[in-house]
Image (cartoon, rainbow, N blue to C red):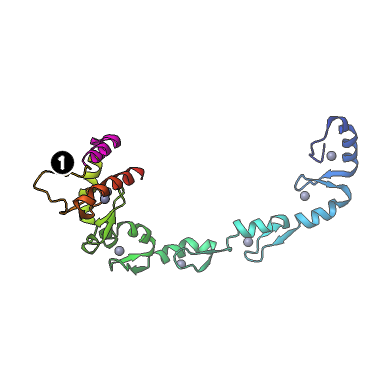
Amino acid sequence: PKCNKEVAEANFALHESHCRRFLCLCPDCEEPVPKEQLDQHRLDQHTQVKCSRCNRKVERCHLMDHEADECEERLQCCKFCELEVPWKELDEHSAACGSRTERCGDCGRYVTLKDQLEHDKICPATQAVSGPPPSVRQTPGTCRGCGASFPAEEMEEHEGDFSKKEARSPLSSSLKAVFLSNRPSGELLGDSRDPNQISTCPHCHLALPLLTLRWHEVKCQIHIHLK
Ligand SMILES: [Zn+2]
Ligand SMILES: [Zn+2]
Ligand SMILES: [Zn+2]
Ligand SMILES: [Zn+2]
Ligand SMILES: [Zn+2]
Ligand SMILES: [Zn+2]
Ligand SMILES: [Zn+2]
Protein backbone atom coordinates (compact mmCIF):
# COMPACT_ATOMS: atom_id res chain seq x y z
CA PRO A 1 0.00 0.00 0.00
CA LYS A 2 0.94 3.59 -0.32
CA CYS A 3 1.90 4.06 3.29
CA ASN A 4 4.61 1.36 3.02
CA LYS A 5 3.39 -0.21 6.24
CA GLU A 6 3.35 -3.95 6.85
CA VAL A 7 -0.31 -4.92 6.80
CA ALA A 8 -1.86 -8.27 7.65
CA GLU A 9 -3.29 -9.93 4.55
CA ALA A 10 -6.83 -10.05 5.95
CA ASN A 11 -6.83 -6.29 6.44
CA PHE A 12 -5.03 -5.48 3.22
CA ALA A 13 -7.94 -4.57 1.00
CA LEU A 14 -9.58 -2.46 3.62
CA HIS A 15 -6.36 -0.76 4.49
CA GLU A 16 -5.43 -0.04 0.91
CA SER A 17 -8.70 1.67 0.15
CA HIS A 18 -8.18 3.72 3.28
CA CYS A 19 -4.69 4.64 2.12
CA ARG A 20 -5.78 5.52 -1.38
CA ARG A 21 -8.45 7.78 -0.01
CA PHE A 22 -6.35 9.60 2.56
CA LEU A 23 -2.72 9.37 1.53
CA CYS A 24 -0.68 10.45 -1.43
CA LEU A 25 3.01 10.26 -2.24
CA CYS A 26 4.86 13.52 -2.02
CA PRO A 27 6.31 14.23 -5.50
CA ASP A 28 9.47 15.64 -3.95
CA CYS A 29 10.43 12.93 -1.47
CA GLU A 30 8.06 10.08 -2.39
CA GLU A 31 6.99 9.70 1.22
CA PRO A 32 3.32 8.96 1.90
CA VAL A 33 1.62 12.06 3.20
CA PRO A 34 -2.03 12.65 4.13
CA LYS A 35 -3.59 14.37 1.13
CA GLU A 36 -4.82 17.39 3.03
CA GLN A 37 -1.37 17.95 4.51
CA LEU A 38 0.58 17.72 1.27
CA ASP A 39 0.81 21.45 0.67
CA GLN A 40 1.94 22.07 4.20
CA HIS A 41 4.41 19.17 3.95
CA ARG A 42 5.97 20.54 0.77
CA LEU A 43 6.20 23.97 2.31
CA ASP A 44 7.78 22.70 5.51
CA GLN A 45 10.17 20.20 3.98
CA HIS A 46 10.92 21.12 0.41
CA THR A 47 10.97 24.90 0.30
CA GLN A 48 14.37 26.09 -0.85
CA VAL A 49 16.10 28.01 1.87
CA LYS A 50 19.46 29.69 1.87
CA CYS A 51 22.27 28.31 3.98
CA SER A 52 23.28 31.19 6.21
CA ARG A 53 26.98 30.36 5.79
CA CYS A 54 27.45 29.66 2.09
CA ASN A 55 24.23 31.19 0.74
CA ARG A 56 23.50 28.08 -1.28
CA LYS A 57 19.88 27.10 -1.62
CA VAL A 58 18.93 23.76 -0.12
CA GLU A 59 15.61 22.13 0.69
CA ARG A 60 14.69 22.87 4.25
CA CYS A 61 14.66 19.17 5.12
CA HIS A 62 18.30 18.93 4.03
CA LEU A 63 19.53 22.07 5.75
CA MET A 64 20.73 20.35 8.91
CA ASP A 65 22.66 17.72 6.95
CA HIS A 66 24.08 20.43 4.73
CA GLU A 67 25.28 22.49 7.68
CA ALA A 68 26.79 19.48 9.42
CA ASP A 69 28.43 17.58 6.55
CA GLU A 70 28.35 19.41 3.22
CA CYS A 71 28.61 23.17 3.61
CA GLU A 72 31.99 24.41 2.42
CA GLU A 73 31.85 27.16 5.02
CA ARG A 74 31.16 24.90 7.98
CA LEU A 75 33.75 25.31 10.71
CA GLN A 76 36.18 22.50 11.40
CA CYS A 77 38.84 22.33 14.07
CA CYS A 78 42.44 22.44 12.88
CA LYS A 79 44.12 19.43 14.47
CA PHE A 80 47.33 21.39 15.02
CA CYS A 81 46.13 24.67 16.53
CA GLU A 82 42.51 23.75 17.36
CA LEU A 83 41.35 26.94 15.71
CA GLU A 84 38.00 26.66 13.93
CA VAL A 85 38.55 27.13 10.21
CA PRO A 86 36.04 27.03 7.33
CA TRP A 87 36.11 23.58 5.73
CA LYS A 88 37.17 24.86 2.30
CA GLU A 89 40.25 26.49 3.84
CA LEU A 90 41.14 23.67 6.17
CA ASP A 91 43.54 21.83 3.82
CA GLU A 92 45.51 24.96 3.12
CA HIS A 93 45.48 26.03 6.74
CA SER A 94 46.50 22.57 8.04
CA ALA A 95 49.39 22.35 5.60
CA ALA A 96 50.74 25.70 6.79
CA CYS A 97 49.87 25.10 10.42
CA GLY A 98 51.39 21.61 10.46
CA SER A 99 54.66 22.92 9.02
CA ARG A 100 55.29 25.07 12.07
CA THR A 101 58.00 23.60 14.27
CA GLU A 102 58.07 23.14 18.00
CA ARG A 103 60.97 22.07 20.13
CA CYS A 104 60.72 18.46 21.34
CA GLY A 105 60.73 18.54 25.13
CA ASP A 106 62.64 15.23 25.27
CA CYS A 107 65.44 15.58 22.72
CA GLY A 108 65.44 19.35 22.09
CA ARG A 109 65.17 19.04 18.30
CA TYR A 110 62.77 21.18 16.31
CA VAL A 111 60.03 19.03 14.90
CA THR A 112 57.17 20.11 12.62
CA LEU A 113 53.77 19.71 14.23
CA LYS A 114 52.64 17.30 11.54
CA ASP A 115 55.64 15.03 12.25
CA GLN A 116 55.24 15.06 16.02
CA LEU A 117 53.34 11.80 16.36
CA GLU A 118 55.93 10.07 14.21
CA HIS A 119 58.75 11.77 16.14
CA ASP A 120 57.36 10.56 19.47
CA LYS A 121 57.94 7.02 18.24
CA ILE A 122 61.53 7.62 17.10
CA CYS A 123 62.66 10.42 19.46
CA PRO A 124 66.20 9.44 20.53
CA ALA A 125 65.57 10.73 24.06
CA THR A 126 62.54 8.52 24.69
CA GLN A 127 64.25 5.57 22.94
CA ALA A 128 66.97 5.71 25.61
CA VAL A 129 64.40 5.40 28.37
CA SER A 130 63.21 2.03 27.07
CA GLY A 131 66.60 0.51 27.90
CA PRO A 132 67.39 0.68 31.64
CA PRO A 133 69.34 3.87 32.48
CA PRO A 134 72.03 3.53 35.19
CA SER A 135 69.90 5.01 37.95
CA VAL A 136 67.17 2.44 37.41
CA ARG A 137 69.57 -0.49 37.72
CA GLN A 138 69.85 -0.14 41.46
CA THR A 139 66.16 -0.09 42.24
CA PRO A 140 64.77 -3.48 43.19
CA GLY A 141 62.54 -5.33 40.79
CA THR A 142 60.09 -8.08 41.54
CA CYS A 143 60.62 -11.59 40.23
CA ARG A 144 57.68 -12.84 38.20
CA GLY A 145 58.41 -16.35 39.41
CA CYS A 146 58.67 -16.00 43.17
CA GLY A 147 57.64 -12.41 43.90
CA ALA A 148 60.96 -11.64 45.60
CA SER A 149 62.57 -8.21 45.20
CA PHE A 150 66.19 -7.51 44.36
CA PRO A 151 68.31 -5.24 42.14
CA ALA A 152 67.51 -5.25 38.45
CA GLU A 153 70.93 -6.52 37.38
CA GLU A 154 70.42 -9.66 39.47
CA MET A 155 66.96 -10.22 38.11
CA GLU A 156 67.95 -11.74 34.79
CA GLU A 157 70.24 -14.18 36.46
CA HIS A 158 67.67 -14.98 39.09
CA GLU A 159 64.86 -15.48 36.65
CA GLY A 160 67.12 -17.56 34.44
CA ASP A 161 67.91 -19.82 37.42
CA PHE A 162 64.31 -19.94 38.32
CA SER A 163 63.06 -21.07 34.93
CA LYS A 164 65.92 -23.57 34.55
CA LYS A 165 65.02 -25.11 37.90
CA GLU A 166 61.40 -25.08 36.96
CA ALA A 167 62.13 -26.91 33.72
CA ARG A 168 64.49 -29.46 35.21
CA SER A 169 62.54 -30.53 38.28
CA PRO A 170 58.77 -30.74 38.48
CA LEU A 171 57.12 -29.56 41.69
CA SER A 172 56.76 -32.95 43.40
CA SER A 173 60.36 -34.04 43.11
CA SER A 174 61.89 -30.69 43.96
CA LEU A 175 59.65 -30.37 47.00
CA LYS A 176 60.52 -33.90 48.07
CA ALA A 177 64.19 -33.06 47.79
CA VAL A 178 63.71 -30.06 50.04
CA PHE A 179 61.74 -32.10 52.57
CA LEU A 180 64.33 -34.86 52.56
CA SER A 181 67.15 -32.43 53.14
CA ASN A 182 65.16 -30.85 55.92
CA ARG A 183 66.14 -33.32 58.65
CA PRO A 184 67.50 -31.60 61.76
CA SER A 185 70.79 -33.52 61.73
CA GLY A 186 72.33 -31.38 59.04
CA GLU A 187 74.37 -34.35 57.76
CA LEU A 188 73.12 -33.74 54.25
CA LEU A 189 74.63 -30.31 54.31
CA GLY A 190 78.14 -31.66 54.76
CA ASP A 191 80.45 -31.12 57.74
CA SER A 192 81.97 -27.89 56.60
CA ARG A 193 78.71 -25.98 56.83
CA ASP A 194 77.66 -24.41 60.10
CA PRO A 195 73.84 -24.58 60.56
CA ASN A 196 73.95 -21.02 61.90
CA GLN A 197 75.81 -19.80 58.85
CA ILE A 198 73.94 -17.17 56.86
CA SER A 199 72.98 -18.19 53.36
CA THR A 200 70.51 -16.98 50.78
CA CYS A 201 67.29 -18.55 49.57
CA PRO A 202 67.77 -19.63 45.94
CA HIS A 203 64.19 -18.57 45.24
CA CYS A 204 63.90 -15.12 46.73
CA HIS A 205 67.52 -14.40 47.69
CA LEU A 206 66.59 -13.63 51.29
CA ALA A 207 69.57 -14.06 53.61
CA LEU A 208 68.81 -16.41 56.53
CA PRO A 209 70.61 -18.80 58.90
CA LEU A 210 70.82 -22.25 57.25
CA LEU A 211 68.39 -23.91 59.67
CA THR A 212 65.73 -21.30 59.17
CA LEU A 213 66.53 -21.15 55.50
CA ARG A 214 65.59 -24.77 54.87
CA TRP A 215 62.14 -24.16 56.30
CA HIS A 216 61.90 -20.93 54.44
CA GLU A 217 62.87 -22.57 51.17
CA VAL A 218 60.05 -25.07 51.45
CA LYS A 219 57.50 -22.34 52.03
CA CYS A 220 59.08 -20.08 49.47
CA GLN A 221 58.98 -22.79 46.84
CA ILE A 222 55.37 -23.68 47.58
CA HIS A 223 54.57 -20.02 47.42
CA ILE A 224 56.38 -19.77 44.09
CA HIS A 225 54.50 -22.63 42.57
CA LEU A 226 51.18 -21.30 43.74
CA LYS A 227 51.78 -18.13 41.73
ZN1 LIG B 1 -1.57 2.17 4.10
ZN1 LIG C 1 8.05 15.47 0.54
ZN1 LIG D 1 26.19 26.06 3.37
ZN1 LIG E 1 45.91 25.38 12.70
ZN1 LIG F 1 62.44 14.28 20.57
ZN1 LIG G 1 62.26 -15.69 41.77
ZN1 LIG H 1 62.83 -17.52 49.73
Q: Tell me where the magenta segment starts and ends, as one range.
A: 166-181
Q: Is residue 164 left or right of residue 72?
A: left
Q: Residue at x 72, y 55 (%)?
A: 61
Give the vertical position of 46 relative to 111 (above or below): above
Residue found at the far front of this picture: 185
Please indicate, yes or no, whether residue 13 appears anywhere in the rendered image: yes
Mark 1: amino acid: Leu
Q: Which residue is mark 1?
A: 188
Instruction: Indicate the quadrant containing the N terminus: top left, top right, bottom left or bottom right.
Output: top right
Q: Is residue 1 above or below residue 126?
A: above
Q: Depth check: 39 or 196 in front?
A: 196
The answer to which of 220 and 74 lies nearer the viewer is 220
| Residue 63 screen position, x and y as percent | 68, 58
Q: Quadrant of the C terminus?
A: top left
Q: Is residue 88 left or right of residue 10?
A: left
Most distant residue in the top direction:
9
Place residue 102 in its image quadrant.
bottom left
- Is 173 or 9 nearer to us in this picture? 173
